Image: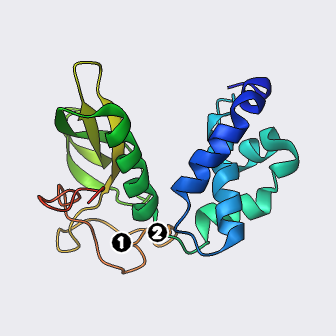
């Protein structure tokens, strides 16, 4: 999306982001959440903090945006649930599709990396496994939510990453594979 296109839809986008981040108690979190959404939508191949901050212009405080993404205490499940509800209302899905995708990794410094089977490579290799939920109609399915499936802490792996800020690395528990969307606990319920 070009800056001109962004300007033409900014009011609608701000209303959408206000709804999406409504559960945030602090105004600065809501502000940087909205800036982050705008940064993701603007043209540019890299969606990391520094290039996004540069594209955002006066709203592009790199340090504040990085703090929002990496250190600010907020629950992504709340945002995903609001987004899933919004998409459910807009799409009216006929079916839910759960899909897993392997992201091949050379090392083990990223969150949730372990030696496991992935269809992407067709063998057991170092990878992350991303699990996504898609809302399906007669039109092409649309992704609703997703996450990284971390291996169970009891499964032997090489060194656990210590440089990452993942919940598994921080000792906050793990999310069992396929346990993201147990029956009765869909993201929008």
Give the SS element for disc 1.
Answer: loop
Residue 24 visible somewhere in the drawing: yes
For the residue pair 115 and 133, the one nearer the viewer reads as: 133
Q: Residue at x 77, y 47 (%)?
A: 53
Q: Which residue is mark 2?
A: 75
The quadrant in which the C terminus is found is bottom left
For the residue pair 108 and 27, the one nearer the viewer reads as: 27
- The mark that comes first in sequence, 1 or 2, is 2
For the residue pair 27 and 46, the one nearer the viewer reads as: 27
Q: Residue at x 30, y 77 (%)?
A: 173
Q: Nearer the viewer, mark 1 or mark 2?
A: 2
For the residue pair 37 and 147, the one nearer the viewer reads as: 37
Image vertical order of residue 27 relative to residue 189, above or below = below
Q: Which residue sits furthest right? A: 58
Q: Which residue is mark 1?
A: 168
**Residue 111, horizontal then vertical, whole percent:** 41, 60
Image vertical order of residue 138 relative to residue 95, above or below = above
Q: Residue at x 79, y 42 (%)?
A: 56
Q: Which residue sits furthest left? A: 183
Image vertical order of residue 93 relative to residue 35, above or below = above
């Amino acid at each position: 999306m070009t800056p001109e296109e962004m300007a033409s839809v900014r009011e609608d986008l701000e209303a959408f982001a206000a709804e999406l981040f409504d559960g945030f108690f602090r105004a600065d979190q809501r502000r940087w959440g909205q800036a982050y959404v705008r940064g993701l939508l603007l043209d540019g191949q890299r969606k990391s903090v520094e290039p996004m901050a540069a594209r955002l212009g006066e709203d592009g405080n790199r340090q504040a945006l990085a703090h929002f993404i990496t250190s600010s205490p907020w629950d992504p499940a709340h945002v995903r649930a609001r987004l899933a509800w919004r998409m459910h209302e807009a799409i009216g899905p006929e079916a839910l599709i759960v899909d897993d995708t392997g992201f091949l990794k050379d090392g083990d410094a990223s969150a949730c990396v372990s030696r496991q089977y992935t269809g992407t490579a067709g063998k057991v290799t170092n990878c992350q496994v991303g699990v996504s939920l898609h809302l399906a109609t007669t039109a092409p399915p649309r992704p609703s939510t997703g996450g990284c499936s971390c291996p169970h802490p009891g499964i032997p792996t090489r060194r656990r990453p210590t440089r990452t800020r993942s919940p598994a690395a921080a000792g906050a528990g793990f999310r069992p594979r396929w346990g993201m969307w147990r029956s009765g606990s869909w993201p929008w319920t």
